[in-house]
Image: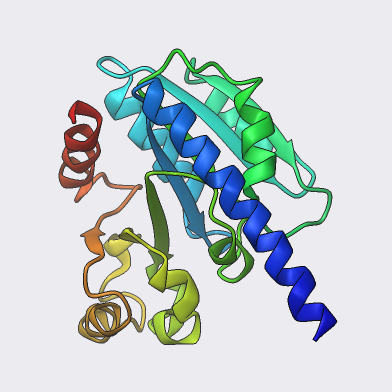
Amino acid sequence: MKRVIVEKKILERNTESAQRIREILKNKGIFSLNFMSSPGAGKTTIIEKTIEALKDEVRVSFIDGDLDTDRDAERVKRLGVDVVQINTSGACHLDADMVLKALNKVSLDCDLLIIENVGNLVCPATFDVGADRNVVILSVPEGDDKVKKYPVMFNVADVILINKIDLYGVLDFDRDKVLKEIREVKPKAEVFELSAKTGVGFDEWIEYVKDFIRQ
């Protein structure tokens, strides 16, 4: 019983901080995306390609969550956007307090704030970080069983990107099964099939992001 009470207090505090983040970003007219995936799904590569496609029209800032390194942050920094690193020192997710503190360091003179969460398909789903849209990436090499194995993650997704579709037909991945299970777990999620390597499917994703920034 005591354990449940502590968890409830932690999540209530997180919800309050997430709401504060939403208010700050809304007042400044900033659209925000929270990227989540398992390690190796192509999260940072998709973020890089998204920034490259938008940077001539859109001002972007970036918050990177990582256990101990700044490797992903350094990759994105080379694109000329303002970057703030959050190292969680072993914690498997970002929470709203971490992101709220990072807002004091990152440039909010931007149109789009991208948050890259720590790579795993479990913990990040529990902690709302105040973003406008949660983007969950599933890659073909991970296999076609992840949606039902990690339903909490896919249930919080507003957008699901199926990445590395250039490997359709090469690897044993049942596309129809995955799409069916996505519809069962999160019927209203937007789904984009793309390849960060070849660029196939990226135009539709970029237009989706642009539409929200214009609103």
Which residue: 29% across, 77% down?
182
- Examine the image and state in which quarter residue 83 appears: top right
- Examine the image and state in which quarter residue 56 appears: top left
Residue 121: % across, % down: 55, 69
Establish if 28 lies above or below 136.
above
Residue 147: % across, % down: 40, 80
Q: What is the number of callouts on the image?
A: 0
44 left or right, relative to 157: right
**The one of 167 and 142 positioned closer to us in this rendering:** 142
Residue 94: % across, % down: 65, 50
Which residue: 80% across, 45% down?
68
166 left or right, relative to 3: left
**The one of 40 and 22 positioned closer to us in this rendering:** 22
149 left or right, relative to 185: right
- Examine the image and state in which quarter residue 55 appears: top left
Q: Quadrant where the C terminus lies?
A: top left
Residue 52: % across, % down: 35, 26
Q: How is the image coloured?
A: rainbow
Establish if 185 lies above or below 167.
below
Which residue: 79% across, 70% down?
6
Q: Quadrant where the N terminus lies?
A: bottom right
Which residue: 69% across, 41% down?
98
